[in-house]
Amino acid sequence: MDIERGRCLKCEKYDTCRSPCQEVNKILWHDNKCFEKHFSDRIQVYTGSSAVKQFSALNKIDNIFSTDDKIPWSSGDTELRQTAVFIERFFNKVPASELAERYGVTVSTIESLYGSAKKVLFKIIQIMDMRSTGIKRVTNSRFSDREKWFLLVNIFGFQGDEVAEMFKVDHRKVMRVVKSMADKYKEKFIEPTENDLITDPKVKQKLTREDVVGLVKDYQRQGLSVRRACHRIADRQGELVGHEIPWRTIESKYVKAMRASRMSSGR
C-alpha cells in the first residue's frame, strides 16, 4: 500500500507498468521479504529468500543420504495383513526377513501368511482353469508374466499402465492380454441357472395322474424337489395349452396318485 500511495503514483510509467522497477525491487527484496502481485488469472511472486533456497538444497542432500526403504510398488499398507505381505513378497521380491522387521513379527509368521495367500490364489486359478484348453496349471514355483498381469489388474486393482511400467512392457500389450484372459474365464464366474442344468421331459396337453408321477420322478432324478417339479410341469403345460395352469393342480394329481399307489400296495 505504501508503494501504491507513494512513489508508484508519482511515476510517469504507472499506467503501463507491468513489472517491478529497480526502486520497487529494493523494497521487495528488503530483509528477504516475499510479496505477491495479483493479476486477473495468475499470481506473480517475487522473492529474494535465500533461506528458502538453502532449505531446498538441504532437502536434496538429505534425500540422497536417506536410509529409508524405497519400494516403488509398495502395497502402501502399514498394517500386517495377508494381502500386503503377498504383494511385497510375490511382486516386489521383498525378503521375508525385511518384512518381519517392518511389521515387527517373526520370519515364520511372514512365511505362513505368504503361504496361505498362495494357496488361495492357486485355488482361484484352478477353479478358472477347468478346461484342458485353459492356461497351464500353476505350480508352487512360479506364475507366468501373463498370469501376473491378470492377477494384478483383475484381483489387486492395479492400472494397466502401472503393471506395464513394473514389467517394462507397453501398456497396450498388458491390456490386450488381460482382456483376452478375462474373456476366456468370464463364464467361470457366471452361476449356471436351473434351465442350464435341467433337461425337461416331454409334456402333453392333457396329463393323467400317472403322467404327472412319471414327470415328477424324472425331475427328482435331476435334483429337483416335488414342489419345484410341479411348478415346471405347470409352466410347460401352460405354454402348450395357451393359458396358466396352477401348479397346485399338478401337485394335487401327484399326491392323489401316490396315495392311491400306497393304498394299492397295502392291500
Image: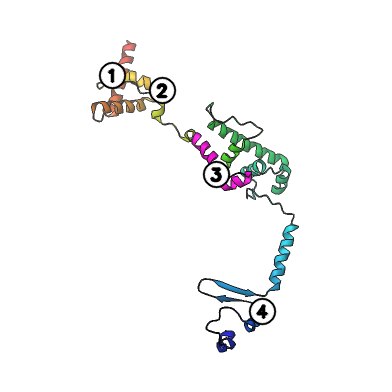
Q: Label 1, secondary structure: give it.
A: helix
**Label at residue 172:** 3
Q: Label 4, secondary structure: give it.
A: loop
Q: Which residue is mark 1?
A: 209
The residue lying at 56 percent from left, 31 percent from top is 135
- Position of residue 74 measured from the top left corner of the image (x, y, whole percent): 64, 48
**Considering only vertical position in the picture, is 11 above or below 263?**
below
Q: Are marks 2 and 3 in contact (CB under 8 Å)?
A: no
**Considering only vertical position in the picture, is 256 above or below 45?**
above
Q: Earlier in the sequence, mark 4 or mark 2?
A: 4
**Label at residue 29:** 4
Q: Earlier in the sequence, mark 4 or mark 3?
A: 4
Q: Are marks 2 and 1 in contact (CB under 8 Å)?
A: no
How dense is the environment of label 4, judged by Cα within 10 Å: few (below 14), some, or many (20 and up)? some
Q: Which residue is mark 2?
A: 222
Locate the N terminus and report the quarter of the image it occupies.
Answer: bottom right
Task: Kindly report the distance in space between the C-alpha atoms of the residues bearing marks 1 and 3.
Answer: 64 Å
How dense is the environment of label 3, judged by Cα within 10 Å: few (below 14), some, or many (20 and up)? few
Q: Which-is-in-front pick, marks 1 and 4?
A: 4
- Position of residue 57 measured from the top left corner of the image (x, y, whole percent): 72, 65
- Image quarter for residue 173? top right
Task: Kindly report the distance in space between the C-alpha atoms of the residues bearing marks 1 and 4.
Answer: 105 Å
Q: Which residues are magenta?
A: 158-184
